[in-house]
Image (tube, grey):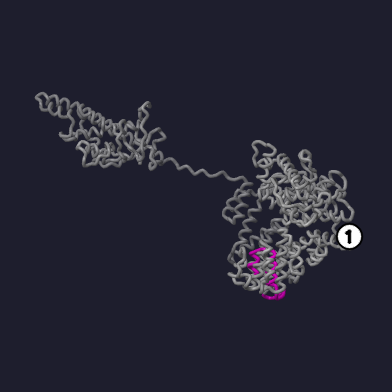
Amino acid sequence: MGLRLEAHHLAAVVGHADRGHRSRRERCIAECPVIKACAIAQPETAPVKAHARNHQDIGHDRLKRFGQHQPITDLAHRLPGLPATEIERLTASDHPRQRKPPAGSRETVKAAREVGLATDRPVKREHPGRSRRKHGSQALADRLVGHAAGLCVDRLAPSDQPPAFEIAQRRRRSAWYPRLAFHLSVIQLGIDMIRTIAFGSIVGVAVLVSAFAAQAERRQPASAPQSAPAPSPDDALINARKAWSQSDLKQLDLAARHIPRDHPLADYPAYWRLNLRLRGPASAPQAEELDAEVGRALARHEGSALGDLLRRDWLLNLGRRGEWQQFDAQLARYPRRDDAQVNCFAWSAPTPRAEPSRTELEQVLMAPRDLPDSCNLLLEQVVRQKQLGPDAAIRRLHRALEAGSVAAIRVAADLLAIEPAALQGALAKPPAEAAYKGRREVALIALSQLARTDPQAAAQRLEAGVPSLTPGDQLFAWSQVAAGGMRRLAPESLGWTQRAAKAPVSDDTLNWMTRAALRAQNWPLVASLIDRMSDEGRRDPAWVYWRARALRAEGRVADSDWLLRRIADEFHFYGQLAAEDLGRLTIVPPQAAAPSDADIAVHSRNAGFRRALKFYELGLRVEGNREWNHQLQPMSDRELLAAAAWACSINVLDRCVNTADRTQREHDFALRFVTPFREQVKRASGERGIDPAWVYGLIRQESRFIMDARSSAGAQGLMQIMPATGRWIAKKLDVPDFRVELLSDRDTNIRFGTFYLKNVLDDLDGSPVLASAGYNAGPGRPRNWRATLAGPVEGAIFAEIIPFHETRDYVKKVLSNATFYASLFTGQPQSLRSWLGQVNPQPASTTALP
């Protein structure tokens, strides 16, 4: 507590003696009706300045700005509130007991003045060598206390007065004393009057100053809270998108206020707002108003990427509401015909515009993946009406089990009326024992889930027999064991595949089983499994190529060559392999005529491209790619090459590559396979003794030449180096003061990336296929995968059986790229097979590389 000056008691109380043991003189000092400081009195051997900085009174110190401290401020605040009697006691000078005490009492007054006024926390004693000069406010407080103590001394009873008082009493009784006393009284009265007037003046001045300060404070207008500076238009747009992603309509509207109409992306906040409203519930009047607003927005954005997005959102909203007439009208203007979510609503309508074929329903509803809500609703309708036969529900369960999707399994279980408790037991890890003894569907769920984590255990269960399973169920269960085994490259996978060869499964499971046969180079089984795939699956270039190889192994060379010619002119991994099998090495095709400056300039004025560039500038690549790709849809080869050339000219290299990659007849591989910062790549590759064509092939796949590319896992830069790997490389290269941020620096990234690639290559016996896999998945994994081989396999087979989809695709594209780059650099035909080589089995081992 701070120094609060109030009436009733004197603050200067000596010690902590109990009131009952004090002398009358002490009690007078303690109880004299003068100004009180609400503080604990503590004995001090020397005067101590009272601590005036008290937490409760912060904000009341109105004179602090003038250099004053709390005591004078509180005095000025408190005195006007004192009762009149207390003011009179402080100022009445004619009271005989308020005269100045004789000289003999000065020690008592001094003692009273030297009592320290303690606050609610200990006060530090002044340093002996430090000046004891007090601030004016503190000196005034001390004088007031001393004066009050002096007044109290005069009120003491004779028995409590000090010896000096007794001497004065004897002098009063002498004969000459009355006259002297009279003159002295007059003098004393004058002194007391002067003292009282001075004291009153001080109090008055303090009160006036306090009142003036309070008046000034009241008149001073309250300062408005400082508002944050308005965000820039670009920052506001980013804030609006963030609010949209968080479904925060209020914050979206606040951010949109700071985006001017001339901003390239000014229409997007309005779209995001409509998107949120279309996704939410709405009453009938609100829905009617919303429909009108969407209709007006579509009229403004017809044919644009934003317009297509908005029309899709509206179609889904209309489908949920069952507004089929409006739905059909908008569906006719929707350009996409492969949108499963929209198609499922269209097919659910009471009178659909076009009845779906059974094949269309099968392709959508029996796909091995999660289905959107509209398709799950359609599935329920189809199952109930038996449009896909009486076994549609169990087949949907099979597709869900192949996808490994718990959500899809639950939907299928509802269609089959499986008890929730039984389903939960089958989905447990590991499945509950009771699951294998219940319904066949429950046992099938349990076995399929077990096959994903422990295929050997699932195989043992099947070998032991599961009574509830039908022969068809057992085939399906073995297929899941085979697929689960091949995902782990289990050596038993071929045997499990042979047991499940006739299982009615999707292409996803057949792909895994075919890889098991391919690893064993069991060509008849490879051919038969590919033949069982869907038409779409058999058209996949990978399976076209491997079926051709299987036919060639069986001696059917003409049939094999016919299949190879179907894909040999295509610019991808299997097209290059097919061409080599036909005797043609990879060579860059003739370059198309360069687009004119006028053709290129057309694209620089394209508003959609400009919106894409703005999205890229803001780091919103998904939205930017959507805008960019929308502009490419109607373009011819010539227009695509001009757009790619413009993208390269403004250094948007990923769009340059992807745009040039779309041409069908006229090509420019200098745009498809760009070579920026060639000197840096050439120098870094030369220092490590690796082919720059491989480095470029890897960068093209890793980052598409986006300098600041960053993966969801944290990999950075052109060659996508992980922070931990970067720190390891920095130590090996003795780079001082390395920071992870340096990985985004072009030269550092290329230097580090080539160093690491060379280390991985050496660690994996100089095999580019193993090293490419190791660069993507970590160098330890290819070692483990290689250890599962029963014998040597060609690099192409090893690339196909890699169990990680991303790494499998990555290795194929990196080495295909490298072959094209090598042809560009040398002008000579190149062999993809020479990059792939042969992979020999070796025992599993560890590596020191990160």
Instruction: Judge by depth and name the residue closer to the eye, 663 or 346.
Output: 663
Which quadrant holds residue 98? top left
Q: Residue at x 65, y 60 (%)?
A: 294
Query: Element at badge 1?
Result: helix
- x, y percentage for residue 742? 67, 40
Three-letter amino acid code at the position of disc 1: Asp
828, above or below 202, in the image: below
Instruction: Judge by depth and name the residue closer to the eye, 630 or 520.
Output: 520
**Left or right placement of residue 134 versus residue 722 in this view:** left
Instruction: Judge by depth and name the residue closer to the eye, 485 or 751.
Output: 485
Q: Which residues are magenta?
A: 384-412
Q: Main secondary structure of the magenta part?
A: helix
Q: Residues within 10 Å of mark 1 (few under 14, many from 20)?
A: many
455 part of magenta stretch = no
Which quadrant holds residue 205? top left
- x, y percentage for residue 551? 86, 63
398 part of magenta stretch = yes
116, above or below 504, in the image: above
**Left or right placement of residue 239 versus residue 150 in this view:** right
List the residue tagged with mark 1: 561
**Left or right placement of residue 237 versus residue 819 in this view:** left
Q: Is residue 326 visible?
A: no
Which corner quadrant holds the N terminus? top left
Count of numbered marks: 1
Q: Is residue 446 visible?
A: yes
